[in-house]
Amino acid sequence: MALPKQIEVRGAKVHNLKNIDVNILLHKFVAISGLSGSGKSSLAMGILYEEGSRRYLDALSTYMRRRIKQGAQADVTSVKHIPSALALRQRPSVPNERANVGTTTETFNVLRLIFSRLGSPVCPNGHRVAPSLAIAEAMSKSGEEMGQITCPTCGVKFYVPSAEEFAFNSDGACTECGGTGKVRQLDENKLIADENLSIEDGAVASWSLPGRNFMPSVAEHAGVRINVPFKDLTDKEKDFVLNGPEKKYKMDFLSGTGRVFHDFNALYENAHQAVLRSAKSSKSERAQKRIAEFFTYSTCPVCHGTRLRPELLKQLVNGKNIDEVEHMQLGDLPAWSKEVLAKLPEEMHQMASSLIKEFINNLQPLLDLGLDYLTMARAGNTLSTGELQRIQLARTLRTETTGVLYVLDEPSIGLHPANVDGLIKVLRKLVDQGNSLVVVDHNVDIIKAADEIIEIGPGSGEQGGQILAQGTPRELEDNKKSLIAPYLNGKADLMARKTTDKVNSDQIKFEIEHYFNLHDIKAGIPVNQITAVTGFSGAGKTSLILDSLVPAIEAQAKGEKLPKQIKKFSSPVHNVVSVDATPIGKSTRSTVATYTSIMDNLRKLFARQPLAKEKHYTPSYFSYNNKEGAVVEREL
């Protein structure tokens, strides 16, 4: 029996797909194109990925399936011959504050092995011991003998650090900062948002943190006036707000939905405690971001930002400690690795070469994807969306899987045109390894590089969801139904806007001394003009605008200190609205209306109607997120 050559999708009705039938080639690179909202992701993610991953999970035992979150069956009549599927999403999750490029890509794991086995340690008496096979063999022993060697100079026995001890997320963490490289202190100036506000109007900033909204009521119950400006409170009242003792108060409490709780045991938390306890208990990334605003951060005085115990930095490989290697650019590491191997004793070459080879193999996909400018020490939460997605893709490529369906959602997002060739090369490598590849993208070069194109349209939303054209790039170039054909054959008229005169010479001027890869930058942004900031991926666009310019304008408006990287700043603009690539909340209870606050206005409108007033319906009765408005038969 011949092996199937295509995935057969019949009766696809996910989201706006119009009951479509389509075949997707296996073991090929297939691009799905179309206008935004036409149904591309519905086909790729909603059907191909969901069905491919769900069927794989269905093959597991019931015990295993209970521990894995499974998607619902897609709204489709049938899907035949679909392999196990993996998805690389458009918006990868942002790594936590402890993650960096080295840990995220797992290259740091191999580097730790290199330092533990090929390193030059220092004995307790200060004698440096040259790399030898004896050190590597000692690391392979078990029990108390693991890592124990004898200094050839003074004869003292000591332990060489293991690979685990070079990990700042476990054994090797600096005892002062816990392996973060930074120490934080609560900034008392940020506890009070505005002394001109009353407590009930939000004067105490830390009481706006999740779970602390009833603190003003508790403070009032304790005798603090909450309806006068904070600056007019007595010293005793202010001290209670900032430093008052933890105590339970029995009181009646009115919730935000209008419900009254009688004899409610409320635990009082002062403004300091509200921040510190929120920092410990909150699991939400969004909440942690808000909490971080109450702290100031400085480099750890013990490890000086290396995140490791200072004694671990004594061990060297080719004259460098592990922190110095972490701060080298990825593009320089293959040459450094080969130099390490060349300088080791001949007896170590066979063992060391396998480690060096693994290290370089881990780096290569990152270099192919144009990430050679990054360092392993670069914090994961400072990476752009495009960088995160390429790291995710590099990690996938390194696994060398076969027979998998990879579904990629806009892998070119955030990429400079010069980086696209490297991405296409990596996509081709996935197919060459024996996998099937489906890519949703708008980039014409990526679409042209595909073996087959499936175009969905003709419009967005209700006007989309149909197969417009399908075939090779060459076939689509001559397809009159295809909307992308003019862009494939080069006949499309590209819209260009005439440059306007500079009617206003005012500029936002700022200088940056040093921030990531920005060094001694002077910039001027003209006001009342459209300014585009472009450059290679990782050139510093995000660092310049989102991390420097936007916070500087916000700080100036609030009368706060400028970001530390800003050397000089002057701006005629005093307000800024930032729209970035951060995805909106993924709660199943959220809708477009709730996220944009349209629902708030609708609820107020309905609450003002005569029947609502007659029945004493408040706006909360028209919300499906609380008991008054939600359907009672089942939980929404």
Image: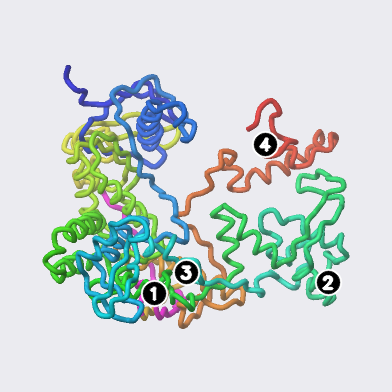
Question: Earlier along the polypeptide chain: callout 2 or callout 1?
Answer: 2
Q: Residue furthest front?
A: 155
The circle on residue 237 is 2
**Quick check: marks 2 and 3 in contact, CB under 8 Å?**
no
The alpha-carbon separation of the residues under discs 3 and 4 comes to: 42 Å
Return the residue nearer the eye: 74 or 550: 74
Q: What is the three-letter code of the residue carrying label 1?
A: Glu
Query: Looking at the picture, does residue 195 appear above or below residue 47?
Result: below
Question: Earlier along the polypeptide chain: callout 3 or callout 4?
Answer: 3
- At which x and y percent is residue 246? 78, 63
The alpha-carbon separation of the residues under discs 4 and 1 comes to: 57 Å
**Quick check: marks 2 and 4 in contact, CB under 8 Å?**
no
Query: Looking at the picture, does residue 406 appear above or below residue 370?
Result: above
Q: What is the three-letter code of the residue carrying label 2?
A: Glu
The circle on residue 311 is 1
SS at mark 1 in the image: helix
Return the residue nearer the eye: 483 or 219: 219
Would residue 118 be visible to someone looking at this image?
Answer: yes
SS at mark 2 in the image: helix
Q: Which residue is mark 3?
A: 528
Check disc 1: other Cα within 10 Å, few if <14, some if 14-19, many if 20+: few
SS at mark 3 in the image: loop
Give the residue displayed 63% in from the left and 48% down from the top.
Answer: 597
